[in-house]
Image (tube, rainbow, N blue to C red):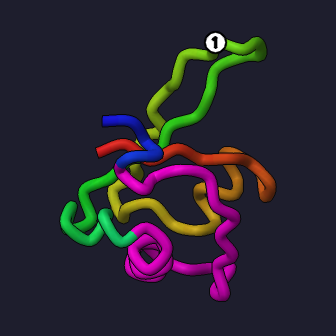
Amino acid sequence: MTFKEADLGRKKIVFADKNGRFEHLRSVLESEYEKLKSQDGAFEFMRAESGGTSRPLKLILMPSNGYTVPYIKDLVGPNTLCIFAQ
């Protein structure tokens, strides 16, 4: 199944709580990507390595307290495209 078929394609998502903890991040993502609800919070962030058209994805490790808005923003920047994997 492709990301598009799984309704995990590109979207611009704005987090109202810029200091949001995992619960806030999860809630916002689940409201934007309905199919993430079935994962019960089990998702990962990945980022593309280097440039080019065929870029391998690298897992963004989750800290012990879960992904947070500041953590993700610090790692990938404020305007970066993220792809979700289950």
Specify the amino acid type for callout 1. Answer: Ser
Would you say the magenta stretch is mainly helix, strand or loop? Answer: loop
x and y percent of residue 43 in the render? 32, 53
Q: Secondary structure at mark 1?
A: loop
Asked whether 34 or 85 is in front, the reply is 34
Q: Up-down: is 11 above or below 60?
A: below
x and y percent of residue 51 in the render? 77, 16
Q: Residue furthest front?
A: 5
Question: Which residue range is magenta in the image?
Answer: 6-33
- Magenta-drawn stretch contains 78: no
Which residue occupies 76% across, 12% down? 52
Which residue occupies 33% across, 56% down? 64
Examine the image and state in which quarter residue 11 appears.
Answer: bottom right
Question: Which residue is identified by label 1?
Answer: 54
Examine the image and state in which quarter residue 37 appears.
Answer: bottom left
Q: Is residue 39 rendered to the left or right of residue 35?
A: left
